[in-house]
Amino acid sequence: MHFSLFSIFTHFATLLCITIPTLILSESKLNLIADQVTISKNNQQVIANGNVQIIAGKRQLFAKKIIYNRNTEQIIVYGPLEILDHNNMRVLAQSAEMSSDLKTILSKEVRALFQDNFQISSKEIHRNPEGITEFKSSMGTSCKICENEAAPPIWNIKSKSILHDKAARSLVFKNAWLELGGIPVFYTPYIKTPEPGITRASGLLTPSLISSDLLGIGIKQPIFFALTENSDLTVSLLKTNETSLIESELRALLPDESLNLKGALEPLLSKEKFKGFIRAEGEKKFSGNVHLDYDVTLLTNKDFLMKYNYGETDSIPNNISLTRFMNYRSEKLQSYYFQSLRTPTAKEPLVLPHLYNQSVSSLADGRVISSKQSSLLGLIEKEKKFLRLNHSIDLSSKKISKKGFIIGTSATLSGSIYNIWEEKNNNSQYVALYPVLSTDLSFPMIKQSPNRKEVIDPRIQLVYSPLTQVSEKTNQDSVQLDFDRTNLFSTNRFPGKDKQESGIWINSSISYLNVFKGNQSFGAEIGQIIRLVEFDQFSPSSILKGRKSDFLLSGFFEYSDLVRLNNSLLMSNELNLRLSETNLSLSHGTSTLSGNLLYSSLAENSKQEAKITELTISGTSQINDNWNSVFDVRHDIANNQTISTSAGLTFENECVDFSLNLSKRFGSSDNLPEDTRFEIKFDLGGFGRKRKSSTSCTKNLSL
């Protein structure tokens, strides 16, 4: 093949024009890609045209045309141009001057976009090599704006300058006006916010406006402090025309430890100086499978928590425990103390110590399960001290016969030694021994077809425990008893170890279950206790008094995830309703509705509430992509009085989060003070967590 000298020279010149620019720009560690690259005659300028792309480290430049000056190492860019930074910031402009490493930029009529969410329009932008970018005569918002919409965004900030610190990942607004719907509403000479996309940074959080009968009218301003990567502190200042409150919450989460410290303080001008509470809750894991758990609350008076709505509870639990787990064995050392908030009672005892040990093993080649429990319990009161040492052993076995019968047997022996110190140094000792024998039999019958399965399960349990006469002074943890489907087949319905059901009795039930394809099922169960030998161990009005206990009935119905209904009730032998609780949950799409109906005529009710009939209804609904609503109503049907009600409405899109909450607590048997509370929160999007995206279009902001 023959080549002319002119053809060889032409191909060499073309290759030279392509390779020389790459060599020149490589001195500045740049990579250049373009449709056409030419070099000036003096070899000082590189001109790139068409789909120009420059890559400098983690920065990229896209433009229509660039001119690179080798002497000044400056680039003149003709747009439209786009600069991408590795931290998800985009800069759009028509022209710019910048350094070859893209660290220094000077441009006019610029728009910057952070995290594809917060946008800034500026008349002029200047970035220095230290990573500080200044937007002059700028306006920023996270709201989406469409070309065909003349209305201003929901909110925007107009500022004389905005400084973006890349290293600190922050934005500083100087001489800024906050506009809502285009109307200036707030001015500040200086404000600093985290860079959009930062979800954790120290600073002011969104304030809320509060109106309350108890608190008055005022504002609540939380302040967030990011202490370390694993801990933070939130301090909230609440100031109203009635009172002042300081709230705080310290959170720490480490690989083997967690801590949550909450508190509230009300400064006073009286001799009391202050009212408040502090609560410490956490856990810590040590070597050897040892766990420390604690939950301790200190408060100045009982009314403070209820008055300021820090928890509608009957009592405050305080406990500290050390637990060790081993193979088939656990040990716990615990101390706890309950503070009653509502019921006037004598001073509650301090439980110290409570040492508990449990182990499980198998015997007879696994046919028998052995369970051992040991405990040491101490109660400390002002004029009395109580100490109990208990040990119990349980042997149980279960097998299935060839005919399908499930046969279970168990034998339990529990013994306790008591030492009680009373006033005037009176000391008494007691010993109690409780043997229990039981055997139970069930015969589940199953009918199955391709579309459903039915199960009928009759079950009886025979229990024997002789009567043991022990002084009532020893009974500290078995004052009240309960009867429901969870303890129907229990050998002792007293909750503790200080008392044991006695006599010979039969626990019986029959249950029915029907399961369809498609997550549809319903079932029912009826149970009763029949005593063959009954001792005078229950109160006359107890549901377990007599040869036959009350009937225990329960049922449920479930239809996929749409409907869930369950009910449990107690009915006397004369078919009088004594207790009923019904729960209903409905779900459809993004809406849920749930209700609870409670009826009780038990003797354990207070004299003021001989019968309790209470209805609770709550619901949530996502109205559309932006609107959500919640409500809750609690009503005393027996007294025809509403106990409490609340409702809330929330709007959220890419640029704003607005919530409105209203709650009212009426006078009721809960002994809580009446209160009507109204709270408004307004949060600007674009700062912190990423909001819901919008389907609306985006245009450049007008300056």
Image (cartoon, rainbow, N blue to C red):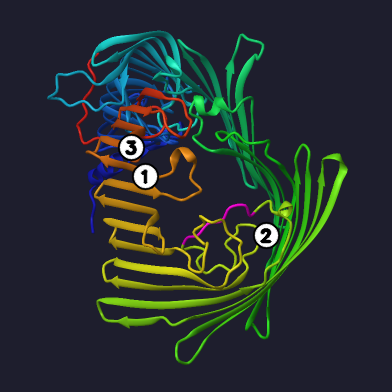
Tell me which residue sits at (62%, 77%) in the image. Answer: 410
Residue 306: give x, y in percent of width and height: 51, 28
- The CA distance from mark 2 to mark 1 is 33 Å
Badge number at residue 476: none
Please give the label number shown on residue 497: 2
Farthest bottom residue? Answer: 402
Q: Earlier in the sequence, mark 3 or mark 1?
A: 1
**Stretch of the chain drawn in magenta:** 478-484
Q: Is residue 447 above or below residue 260?
A: below
Q: Amino acid at mark 2?
A: Lys
Amino acid type, mark 1: Thr
Per the image, label 3 sits on a secondary structure element best described as strand
Nearest the eye: 329 or 575: 575
Q: On screen, 587 above or below 233?
A: below
Q: Nearer the viewer, residue 213 or 265?
A: 213
Query: Reading the chain from its start, which is encountered first: label 2 or label 1?
Result: 2
Q: Nearer the viewer, residue 602 or 507?
A: 602
Closer mark to the observer between disc 3 and disc 1: 1
The extreme right residue here reads: 425
Q: Which mark is residue 633?
A: 3
Q: How many residues crowd mark 2 within 10 Å: few (<14), some (14–19), many (20+)?
A: many
Label 1: which residue? Answer: 613
Q: Secondary structure at mark 2?
A: loop
